[in-house]
Image (tube, grey):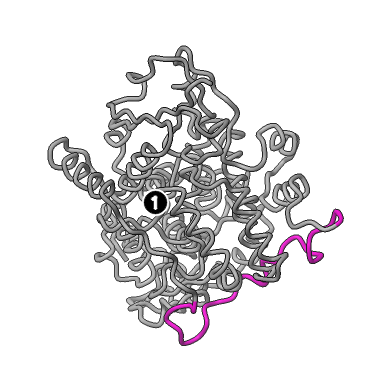
Amino acid sequence: MRTRWLFADQLGPHFLDAPGQPALLIESKAVFRRRAFHRQKAHLVLSALRHRAHEGDVRLVRAETYREVIKEPLTVCHPTSRAARGLVRRLPGVEMLPPRGFVTAPRDFVAWADGRDHLRLEDFYRHARRLHDVLMDGGEPTGGRWNLDADNREPPPRGVRRLDAPAAPPIVEDEIDREVRAELDRWQHDDGIVFVGNDGPRLFPATRAEALARLRHFIEHRLPLFGPHEDAMLAHDPWMAHSLLSPAINLGLLDPMEVIEEAEGAYRSGAAPLAGVEGFIRQLLGWRDFVWHLYWYFEPRYRSANELRARGQLPKWFAELDADAVGARCLSDVLAGVRDRGWVHHIPRLMVLGNYAMQRGWRPAAVADWFHRCFVDGYEWVMTANVVGMSQYADGGRMSSKPYAAGGAYVNRMSDYCGGCRYDPKVRSGPDACPYTAGYWSFLARHEQDLAGNHRMAQPLRGLHRLSDLEALLEQEKARGSRAP
C-alpha cells in the first residue's frame, strides 16, 4: 500500500484507505511566511499536525516547502485549494485521488448545477437531502417542511447575559502545545514571521479524540438548545449553543457525514428538536458543501469578482484587529472576539464584520483574505464564496439573491449590543448616528442603479428617497472615511 500524503486539513481516518496505511505529513514553514495568519490558527494547525504524527504509521517532515520533501511515489486526496492542486499535479509520482471530507461528490454537484441560471443554497440543500437520504421520510422531508429557519431566528432571551447551555469540554494543552508555542515565538523573534491576533490557550480540538469528545458533548448537551437562537448575539456569550466543531471538521478530524448522522440520530431518538437539528444539518450538508463546490465550479477569477466596484483598502484598525479603537459596541466586541479567539459565529461574521465591510466598499478579495487568515476555521475554499459572493455581494447575485446589508435595527433586534453603545440604532445622522444605520443608507444610495433590478431590494430603495436627511447623511459618511466608528 502506497504512502498517503496528508495535507494539514486531511487528518482524520477517512483520508486513509485502511487502518495502518503509512502516511506522510509535511509541515511547511513557507506557508506561514506568505500570509500573516492569526497566531492561534497557526498554533492549532501545527499542534494538529504534530499530534497526528504521534498516531500510527505517520511520518512528519518539517521543511521550508512541500516540494523539497516529495521523493517517493505517493497518493494524496484532492487538496482544498487551487494552488495545492496545481502543486500536486506538477509533482512526479504523486497520484491524486478524488476529494474526501465532504458529502456530495463533485460529479453530483456538477450534474445538479449545470444549466441553472442561479445557484441557490436552498435548491442544492433539498437535492442533497434527497441524494443522501438525510432527514427524509418516505421521499418527503421529515416533518413535512424542508426549511425550518422561521423557528431558528429568535432574538436572544430578554435580560440574560448568557444562554443556559453547558460549556463545551475544555481543551487541556500538553507538551506538544508548549513546543508549538515556543517555536512560534522563535519564528516571530528570529525569522520575522508575522502573525495577527493574540496568542492564548488552545480552544479547539487538535486530535480526533478531542474532536469526538466535543461532538458527543454538543449532540447531548448543546444541540437541544441550538436552534432558536442560532442567529442571536450576546455580548457576554460568544459561544451561545453553537457546536464549535467547524475548526475540527475543516482540519479533517471529523467526517461531516458522521456529524450529520449523529445529529439526525438525536432527533430520531427524541433527544433534540427537529428545527434545531434541521438548522444544524443545513450548515453542514447544505452550506459547507455548497461553498466547497462553488469554489471549484466557479471560474478561478471568481475570487476577484467585484461587481459593485468596491475599491477601498482595509483600514489599519480592522486589518490589525484593533478592537479598542472602535466605539461601536457590536463591532468592537466582535473584532475583539476575532483578536482573542480567532472565531466568532456565523451572524457576527456576516452581519457585523461583512456587513460593515460591504457598506464601506472595501475590496472583496482583501476582505476574503482577511477572513481566511484571521479565523481558525478559515481556508481559501471556505471564504471565497462565503465572503466574495454572500457577504460582499461582489458576484452580482450568482449565489445569493440579495446583498446582506442591514442597519442598526437588525443588530438591535438580534443582540444586546445596542443598549450599552454610544450610538443609537434609530439615528442615521449626527453625533449619535449608528454607523450601521448610516452605512446602510449610504450603501443603498451608492448602488441604487446596481440594485434597481433586484425585486428583493425594491422596498428599501423606495425608502431611500423618503429620507429627509439623505444629503447630510452622505456627507457624514464621506467624512467618516476609513476612521474607526
Determine the residue positioned at 37% across, 47% down.
370
Q: Does residue 140 show up magenta in the picture?
A: yes
Determine the residue positioned at 69% across, 58% down.
455
Q: In this view, does 342 lie above or below 113?
A: below
Viewer-proximal residue among 69 and 466: 69
How many labels were placed on the picture? 1
Q: Check disc 1 and report the residue beneath it.
A: 375
Residue lying at the far right in this picture: please name it: 138
Q: What element carries label 1?
A: loop
Determine the residue positioned at 51% across, 69% down.
241
Residue 209 percent location from the top left of the image: 45, 51
Q: Is residue 145 above or below residue 8?
A: below
Q: In this view, does 315 lie to the left or right of 399?
A: left
Q: Give the range drawn in magenta.
A: 138-164
Magenta segment main secondary structure: loop
Residue 327 percent location from the top left of the image: 30, 71
Residue 34 percent location from the top left of the image: 30, 34
Q: Is residue 21 above or below residue 224?
A: above
Residue lying at the far left in this picture: please name it: 190
Determine the residue positioned at 28% across, 49% down.
177
Q: Is residue 476 above or below residue 262?
A: below
* Residue type indicated by callout 1: Phe
Residue 246 percent location from the top left of the image: 49, 53
